[in-house]
Amino acid sequence: MFGYARRILRIDLSTGKTRINTLTEEVAKKYIGGIGLGMHLLLENSKPGTDPFSPDNPLVLATGPLSGTMAPTGGNGHAFVSKSPATNGLGEAKSHGFFGSELKRAGYDAVIFQQRAKKPVYVWIDDNNIQLMDAKHLWGKSPQETEDAIREDLGDYYIRVASIGLGGEKLSRFACIINDKTRAAGRTGMGSVMGSKNLKAIAVRGTKDVGVAKPEEFMEFVKMMHERMKGPATAKYRTLGTALNVLVHNSLGALPTRNFTNATFEGAENVSGEYLNERFVAKIAGCSSCAMRCEHIAVVPEGPYKGTTTRVEYEPLWAFGPHCGVDRLDAIIKAMDLCNYYGLDNLSAGNVVGFAMDCYEHSILTKEDTDGVELEFGNAEAMIELVHRIGKREGLGDILAEGTKRAAEKIGKGAVKYANHIKGLEMTGYDIRGLKTAAMGYAVSFRGADHNRHGAYGFDLKGTVDRFKVEKGRSKLVIDVEDLYAVIDSLIVCKFSRGTYYKKYDDLAAYYTLTTGIPMTAEELEKAGERIGNLGRLFNVREGLTRKDDHLPPKVMSTPIPDDTVSKGSYITQKELDFMLDDYYAHRGWTEEGLPTLEKLKDLGLENLAYIVKEKIRKPSKK
Amino acid sequence: MSSIHARKFVSADPDKCVGCCVCEYACSFEKEKAFNPLKSRIRVVRLDPVINMSLTCRLCEDAPCVTACPRDALTQSEENGVIMVDEDKCNGCGWCIEACDYGAIMLHPERKVVFMCDLCDGDPKCVEWCPEEALDYVTVDVLAQKARIAAVKKLFQEAMKTEKT
């Protein structure tokens, strides 16, 4: 078995004891790596009903079979998987950069962090040598400062570090884990799980070779992928970048604006990808082993935030821009940089600020609550101030650091009507009131509000389907992409490369076999995708999530799009949502309550998880 | 010995290099049939996302590494300027590594002798693989020509901008 390191490392943070388990070929083939392997290890190593911040909630770090090889975009990924403090269901977040390949070279496919350290520590993985290091001097530092300090401390400047900032230390429910200074395993609050373990950082140095099963053929395959990556499938990422979406979404009435009050933004030109690239982007950089390049590094050229440098993508730009009604890119870039500094998920942070603004506009929050900050939509300075307060958990920021769902419950006075989240995870930059195939994907996603679990917005935006209609058959579209994305996130290849696998599973299966030597057919790989999707669902069912949790944000179901645009009047009714869920569950082979059946589990080779659904299927609860 | 003007070496264009490390992988695979940047003859330096560039041996004239070696393990090819290591003589003491201004000499993680770029017999694999075409196999003279052309182009662009506004 090549590609894989064949070793899973277990670290008990309370004692510093480590153990190595073997990754068998059977498990490797079944769960691939990344989120698939991570979910499998999480299910095996945790008990139902564990609090996400309990020492008993393990944090799993997993690489993929391609990590550490020359496979473009596949060489460099890693995933964190744990029970999410945002959703109380499955938490998972991937990141790219240089960290994952280093971990593979150190000789590990996955690391399971268990229990809690008595005082702040960081873990130093130096090939076979694992040590808990005192992190007292790092506590309170940003991930960027932590990375530099650890390299200085250990005297090796090629050490790769993944760490948390103040957000994770103070258990903000949307804290992220940052590696290589600007790359984040962003969503579902994995940083706060790390913080709850008193684990400040993971430092890795790996010196071992990573081999592949069929070196010559593998290199030919890589050469082909290099060529494809220079082609049309990745052109968007190499030119304007994802910020291109701003004007596209705006023209289609699909750009959520002012916390989903509107679906078009009058200031869209000022925050467009076109303007961003013309005025702010200094360089487009790339991750380890990548043959495209997508990292649009923006530098603010003038004004109060002059010199601020950060990587810009559409989602965070949207969250702090249109979503907060802010049309100043310098302030948006500053807010994003601050999130990196505090170690907060940009996307959720921007959502929370927009939510607070909406509450302020509706007098649910007053100037007294905000300690004098005038929190109207569009107030860029107020937005920046609020990010500081969330990062430090000061004043209103302390409540907002809990995420929109919990903050709304704490604030009361009807604030829940403005809290746009699914399962406790904040929304992303697609106005799904008028993207109804995407809406289904959002509702059923196992990690909450997310476009990256299904990519179903593609069908809506490209006009493949009538996006204002709910009809039978959409579930197949959603499921097909969901399964593919589950494979992509398990192999871990970059989602931006998805268009370069012209023959989809055939390409990906060939990639897998050339790398690992384990025979894999396209059908088997597709099945693995379905298995991994079901695994996410099963974890959520085990933790008590039900059909009720496959919901949509309140505004999506209450406020028709008011703007004079193509999507005017569109929103989603309860009846439509019920129709979507019935259609989706049926197509998945699940019960009406959204429970994977015993037959389905058998079909997927997941009989060992029958305990999760057995009781529930026998005694179905009322809808 | 061939004139320094005629010596071709691998050079990275800092404006094009994105720090993706494909050159490191290509090199370690070509030379050692393994993916391992520690066995690469070319190394990427990433100071931050904007500042990154790969570096390898520049085939200095009267190479200081050769002079520094106390065991006469290093010699420089008269034909193309490549540094050659006599692995029987080299004991990995590291004097040559210290002498190199570019960090282009490394200690092999397993064999414990030093190694550096050998230009892949005139067909450097890193240059072939670089997805950004940031690597060039050139002489210093050609580099100078390119720099001059780039400088003039830049001036010309500035002038065009001034004309417009």
Image (spheres, grey):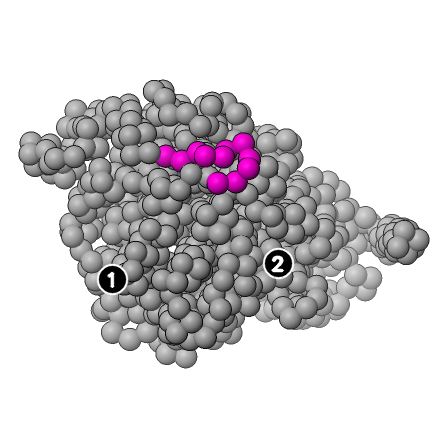
Q: Earlier in the sequence, mark 2 or mark 1?
A: 1
In the image, residue A58 lies at what x, y percent? 25, 56
| Res. B18 in view | no
Q: Which residue position is annotated with label 2?
A: A328
Name the amino acid type tagged 1. Phe
Name the amino acid type tagged 2. Arg
In the image, residue A454 lies at what x, y percent? 40, 35
Disc 2 and disc 1: Cα gap in Å?
A: 37 Å
Residue drawn at x 73%, y 64% is B66
Q: Residue furthest bottom?
A: A137
| Magenta-drawn stretch, dominant element (helix, strand or loop) | loop
Q: Answer few, some or many: residues within 10 Å of disc 2's Cα (few below 14, many 20 plus, some between 14 and 19).
A: some
Helix, strand or loop at label 2? It is loop
Q: Quadrant of the N terminus of chain A?
A: top left
Q: Chain of mark 2?
A: A
Q: Quadrant of residue A122?
A: bottom left
In the image, residue A380 lies at what x, y percent? 56, 63
Query: Comparing marks 2 and 1, which lies closer to the viewer?
Result: 2
Q: Chain of mark 1?
A: A
- Residue placed most toward the observer, B103 or B75: B103
- Residue placed most toward the observer, B122 or A71: A71
Q: Is residue A448 above or below residue B86?
A: above
Q: Which residue position is annotated with label 1?
A: A53
| Res. A620 in view | yes
* A260 relative position to A278: left or right: left
Q: Is residue A189 above or below residue A136?
A: above
Query: Which span is picked out in magenta?
Result: A562-572
Residue drawn at x 42%, y 71% is A367
Residue A568 is one of the magenta-drawn residues = yes
Residue drawn at x 22%, y 40% is A548
Helix, strand or loop at label 1? It is loop
